[in-house]
Amino acid sequence: MIIRSWGIVMITKTINQKAWLLVLPVLLVVSLNAIIPLMTVVNYSIQDTFSPGVFFFEGTKWYQEVLSSPRFHSALGRQLLYTGIILLIEIPLGVAVALAMPRKGPWVSVCLVLMALPLLIPWNVVGAMWNIFALPDIGLLGYGLNWLGFDYNYTQQPLAAWFTIILMDVWHWTSLVVLLAYAGLSSIPDAYFQAAKIDGAGSFAVFRYIQLPKMKRVLIIALLLRFMDSFMVYTEPFVLTGGGPGNSTTFLSIDLVKAAIGEFNLGIAAAMSILYFLMTLLVCWVFYTVMMRGEDS
Amino acid sequence: MRGTKILVVCIYILFLMLPIYWLLNMSFKTTNEILGGFSWYPQEFTLESYKTIFTDPTWYSGYINSLKYVLMNTVISVSLALPAAYAFSRYRFMGDKHLFFWLLSNRMAPPAIFVLPFVELYSAMNLFDTSLAVALAHCLFNIPLAVWILEGFMSGVPREIDETAYIDGYSFPRFFVKIFMPLIAAGIGVTAFFCFMFSWVEMLLAKNLTSVAAKPIVAVMTRTASTAGYELGLLAAAGALTLIPGVIVIWFVRKHIAKGFALGRV
């Protein structure tokens, strides 16, 4: 098997319109799941209803209402803050751990399996686990922090709730960054390191001029995945704090489900959904374009 | 230098293991002991919670239901993604780049948006409360992911192999199954692992698309929590058991997982 060299994709493709037939099954199943529900949401977002089955066209009323509501603004603000903080912690931490991993030997598999463990736990179990782990009276984290002299109770203090949610996300997802960065690192041929040694390069120079450039692509992917997933996070914070205390940890998804299922405000919820989706799409499109440009050059 | 490196990895793994240890610790305690106060290990070790789960059908059928839709989803996602990924890796066709981005954009759609429309859609198709509904719904994010990973692996296989096979008189399906698939076996394994993982951990859609017959374990857990008061020991044991399928699957692909990331486009 020939391993594709990094950065340079040497595959020439032939033009063949029949390739559409190979894509067709995927297209059908994903369309069923994507287009019909999305159109339903668009429908709700421009209509109002007073009784089942009776709808009135409302135009952009819901969008205006959402865009001007302080509730949406604060949920969006919290969401951006949360995503920003976890990206700032998880990406550098993940890279640091990946750099510290052994490059070969029997311990590599053991480390990888142990690190991947949090990724494989159902999200509501993650939330429930941390819910108890952080309780001040019976959980290790809460008990430990109070024992160390911190006044910590995440069910009542917004700051403590934020701390717990961020720690949980770091616990849950940093390993994904580690796995990706490690894969990037292990694709570097040994010859590079030997050459660097002969040139007398220090470990920072090796990182800056060999390891970081080789990890660039996987790091962009890690950033993209972590951005998308943290921006749509729902289950873990919902199970951990239920959006509280007060509204202090109500992120976009939680607010959305509250509006749609809790309050049955379909119009508002649908307009929020569409705006939410467009924001994610926009950021990802920018990332994707940058990524593909990097690949072509 | 070497010492600090080992220390970093050890501290990180310790940090990962602490909450998991706490879960296991609680699963061997009685609920009274858990609520009674703080202790590092079970004072009265009990397997009662595990016994309840393995003997009560409302509990163990939850695991069976979950595994059912996860396996169905993995099979559907991988088998549909294989030809599509081949098309993306070998051919240029009208709209290919746009189609690829559109596929990926579905991986970005927050599931919270789709909860209500999905319930309506699958009720209209008479699939509500079946494993198939959840399996198909999870295709929304697993098929794009599968296409993405497989495309990376397939692009690592030189084209000459395809051309030689056609010259030797292989038809496309025979070439694909007999020659091409064995070449990317590791890629198929890694893809199946990711599909399994994302379907196994998702709960918002799984919970809302089922009610009684196909109720997944994640939903059994939340409902038990609200009706029977907090039976923490039982919940902890149920949570601990959800770790097992993941551990088994990751053990099978442990050799390929790093390579999968390196070769694939994930």
Image (cartoon, grey):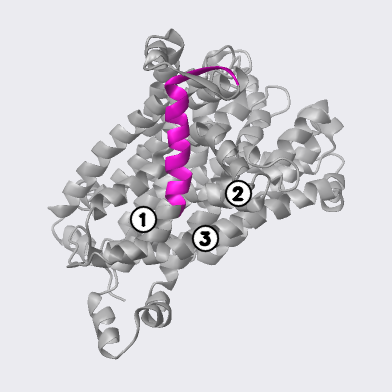
| Numbered label attached to residue B148 | 1
Task: Name the N-terminal-most of marks 1 and 2.
Answer: 2
Residue B87 showing in the rendered view: yes
Q: Which percent across, then down, holds residue B194?
A: 49, 55
- Asked whether A43 falls inside the magenta stretch, the response is yes
Which is nearer the eye, A101 or B156?
B156
Q: What residue is at 83 percent from the left and 27 percent from the top?
A: B36
Q: Secondary structure at mark 1?
A: helix
* Pointer 3 with pointer 2, Cβ within 8 A: no
Q: Secondary structure at mark 3?
A: helix
Residue B24 showing in the rendered view: no
Q: Nearer the viewer, mark 1 or mark 2?
A: 2
For residue B109, side relative to residue A131 (left or right): left
Residue farthest to the bottom, as pictured: B168
Q: What residue is at 63 percent from the left and 27 percent from the top?
A: A134
Determine which quarter of the picture holds residue B152: bottom left
Q: Which percent across, then down, holds residue B105?
A: 36, 42
Which is nearer the eye, A197 or A57?
A57
In the picture of the structure, the residue carrying the numbered disc 3 is B76
| Quarter placement of the N terminus of chain A | bottom left
In the picture of the structure, the residue carrying the numbered disc 2 is B133
- Chain on which label 3 sits: B
Q: What residue is at 74 percent from the left and 44 percent from the top?
A: B238
For residue A28, side relative to residue A247 (left or right): left
Q: Which three-letter amino acid code belongs to the residue tagged 3?
A: Ile
Determine which quarter of the picture holds residue B237: top right
Which is nearer the eye, B103 or B238?
B103
